[in-house]
Image: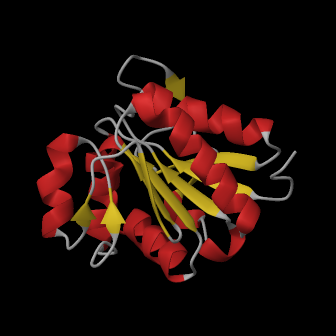
Amino acid sequence: MKLKGKKVAILVEHHYQDMEVWVPYFRLLEEGASVVFAGTGTAASYQGKYGYPVTPQTTAGKLKAANLDALVIPGGWAPDFLRRHASVLMLVREMNSAGKTVACICHGGWVLASAGILKGRTVTGFSAIKDDLIHAGAKYVDREVQVDKNLITSRTPDDLPAFCREIILNLMEN
């Protein structure tokens, strides 16, 4: 119960990468964190790329950085939908400005790029979005997990053990 009292939101939208939502969800619960799914409000339930549904308890627009310790942004095609919502981008900016944990994996870096928080940061992500991350001002590295202060990034589902480990360590320190 290393994370008892910690509050985490996982952003969800259509075509999220199933493992990149559910593995962090269960790992964070296992460590005692309170975890909620937050959607954009476009649907009552969202289907993952492989058909697994998730029902959000809230929307990004109803969340405040002051009430959260971490935000997790999974990959799949969901980030392309997430980044179209001002409420999502505002929440990401608020979390980052407050120095709170912002963790994204795979295509999740698209949301960070659209939120405008990558200038001068060192990140990783799925290789197909490498140029997007660089054009947003980040230094791209190809490794399983990259921690740059409060920002935690990973590349693919294969990196989930390292990704979850770093989220947990970051939350324990803050």
Q: Please give left or right for residue 152 compared with residue 172 in the image.
A: left
Which image quarter: residue 137? Answer: bottom left
Residue 128 seen in the current view: yes
Q: Residue at x 21, y 61 (%)?
A: 133
Q: In the image, is residue 98 above or below residue 140?
A: below
Residue 47 seen in the current view: no
Q: In the image, is residue 14 above or below residue 105?
A: above
Q: Residue furthest bottom?
A: 97
Of residues 158 and 77, which is closer to you in this image?
A: 158
Quadrant in which the N terminus is drawn: top right
Q: In the image, is residue 26 above or below residue 99?
A: above
Residue 170, given in percent of the width and then of the height, sits at 64, 60
Residue 58, given in percent of the width and then of the height, sits at 61, 52
Q: Residue at x 50, y 34 (%)?
A: 160
Q: Please give left or right for residue 1 compared with residue 161 in the image.
A: right
**Count of labels in the image:** 0
Residue 38, given in percent of the width and then of the height, sits at 55, 50
Of residues 174 and 49, which is closer to you in this image?
A: 174
Quadrant in which the C terminus is drawn: bottom right
Of residues 144 and 125, which is closer to you in this image?
A: 144
Q: Please give left or right for residue 110 compared with residue 66 in the image.
A: left
Q: Please give left or right for residue 126 compared with residue 135 in the image.
A: right
Q: Residue at x 59, y 42 (%)?
A: 164
Of residues 137 and 47, which is closer to you in this image?
A: 137
Residue 131, given in percent of the width and then of the height, sits at 12, 56
Colour scheme of the rendered structure? secondary structure
Q: Residue at x 43, y 75 (%)?
A: 93
